[in-house]
């Protein structure tokens, strides 16, 4: 279940609430005001990480071909 962060519009209290559904009434624990601004948590934030920007990674972390010493030309094996 998601935990949302709220910022009270009246007293500025910052608090968190576990929201079961959209009909959950959120009130400030300090002044009991129903006016609050929701602060999107990091979990609810859209994925801004352009992870696939690298795309086709030529090479990468697999130095199997031409692997330094034991490539065959040094005769260590
Ligand atoms: Zn308040």
Image (spheres, rainbow, N blue to C red):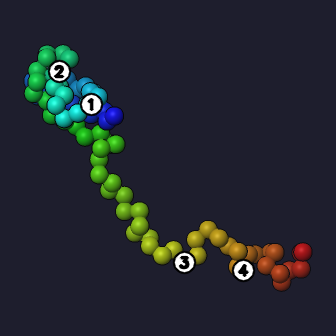
- Residue situated furthest bottom in the rendering: 73
Quick check: 72 above or below 23?
below
Does the residue tagged 2 have its C-beta within 8 Å of any atom of ligand 1?
yes
Can you tell which quarter of the image residue 31 is in? top left
Q: In the figure, is residue 44 to the left or right of 61?
A: left
Question: CA–CA distance between discs 1 and 3?
Answer: 46 Å
Which tag, 1 or 2, sits closer to the chain's start?
A: 1
- Say whether disc 3 or disc 2 marks the residue closer to the N-terminus: 2
Residue 46 shows in this picture: yes
Image location (x, y in percent) of residue 12: 16, 25
Instruction: Determine crowd level at label 3: few under 14, some 14-19, many 20+ residues with C-alpha closer than 10 A.
Output: few
Could you tell whether 5 is left or right of 37 in the image? right
Quarter of the rendering containing residue 1: top left
Quadrant hosting residue 52 = bottom left
Report the residue at 19% width, 28% height from top. Answer: 24
Which numbered disc, 3 or 4, marks the residue that appears first in the sequence? 3
Q: Give the residue at x 23% y 33%.
A: 21
Q: Which residue is mark 3?
A: 58
Q: Earlier in the sequence, mark 2 or mark 4?
A: 2
Establish whether ligand 1 lies closer than 8 Å to the Cβ of label 4: no
Residue pointed to by mark 4: 66
Q: Which residue is mark 1?
A: 20
Q: Is residue 62 left or right of residue 58?
A: right
How dense is the environment of label 1, judged by Cα within 10 Å: few (below 14), some, or many (20 and up)? few
Marks 1/2: CA distance?
A: 17 Å
Question: Between tags 4 and 1, which lies in front?
Answer: 1
The mark nearer the N terminus, 4 or 1, is 1
Q: Which x, y percent locates residue 10?
A: 9, 24
Q: What is the secondary structure assignment of the residue under circle 2? A: loop
Distance between the alpha carbons at the discs numbered 4 and 1:
56 Å
User: Do labels 3 and 4 touch, CB within 8 Å?
Assistant: no
Measured in 3D between alpha carbons, the distance from the residue under mark 3 to the one under mark 2, in whole angstroms, is 54 Å
């Amino acid at each position: 279940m998601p935990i949302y962060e709220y910022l009270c519009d009246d007293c500025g209290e910052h608090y968190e609430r576990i929201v079961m559904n959209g009909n959950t009434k959120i009130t400030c624990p300090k002044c009991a005001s129903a006016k609050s601004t929701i602060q999107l948590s990091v979990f609810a934030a859209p994925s801004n990480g352009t992870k696939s920007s690298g795309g086709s990674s030529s090479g990468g972390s697999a130095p199997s071909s031409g692997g330094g010493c034991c490539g065959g030309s040094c005769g260590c094996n």
